[in-house]
Image: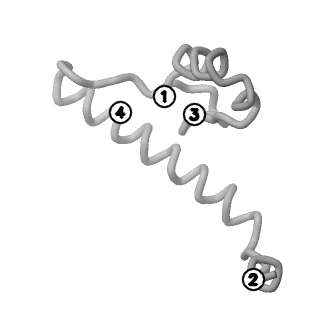
């Protein structure tokens, strides 16, 4: 998702504002659509995706494990 897509989504679904994030949100980068591009463009996009997943994994890991007792209540 790029910034423009997120903006359109939030216009159509106002309750999503502030709760919709791009994969590379923390580095303020859009991941371009490589469709129709060169193989090197696909490689660039793959690296951006890997960076975004690593960043989110780290951020989510920092939250710690879920409290299982709260879930079952």
Locate residue 4 relative to residue 37 in the image: left or right.
right
Residue at image coords 17%, 22%: 38
Q: CA distance from mark 2 to mark 1?
A: 34 Å
Locate residue 11 relative to residue 23 in the image: left or right.
right
Circle 1 or circle 4, nearest the eye: 1
Residue at image coords 59%, 58%: 57
Q: Nearer the viewer, residue 63 or 12?
A: 12
Q: How packed is label 3: few (under 14 Cα within 10 Å), some, or many (20 or more)?
A: some
Answer yes or no: do the residues labelled 1 and 3 have beta carbons within 8 Å?
A: yes
Among numbered discs 1 and 4, the one appearing first in the sequence: 1
Q: Position of residue 62 (x, y in %)?
A: 74, 64
Q: Nearer the viewer, residue 26 or 21?
A: 21
Circle 2 or circle 4, nearest the eye: 2
Among numbered discs 2 and 3, the one appearing first in the sequence: 3
Residue at image coords 54%, 39%: 23
Q: CA distance from mark 2 to mark 4?
A: 40 Å
Q: How packed is label 2: few (under 14 Cα within 10 Å), some, or many (20 or more)?
A: few
Q: Position of residue 52 (x, y in %)?
A: 52, 44
Q: Position of residue 20 (x, y in %)?
A: 65, 34
Residue 29, quarter of the rendered image: top right
User: Which disc number belongs to residue 22?
Assistant: 3
Above or below residue 58? Residue 31 is: above
Residue 35, quarter of the rendered image: top left
Among numbered discs 4 and 3, the one appearing first in the sequence: 3
Residue named by callout 4: 45
User: Which disc number belongs to residue 72?
Assistant: 2
Q: CA distance from mark 1 to mark 3?
A: 6 Å
Element under label 3?
loop
Q: CA distance from mark 4 to mark 3?
A: 14 Å
Circle 2 or circle 1, nearest the eye: 2
């Amino acid at each position: 998702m790029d910034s423009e897509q997120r903006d359109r989504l939030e216009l159509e679904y106002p309750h999503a504002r502030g709760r919709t994030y791009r994969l590379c949100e923390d580095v303020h980068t859009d991941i371009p659509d490589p469709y129709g591009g060169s193989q090197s463009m696909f490689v660039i996009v793959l690296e951006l995706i890997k960076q975004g997943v690593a960043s989110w994994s780290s951020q989510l890991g920092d939250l710690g494990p879920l409290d299982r007792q709260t879930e079952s209540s």
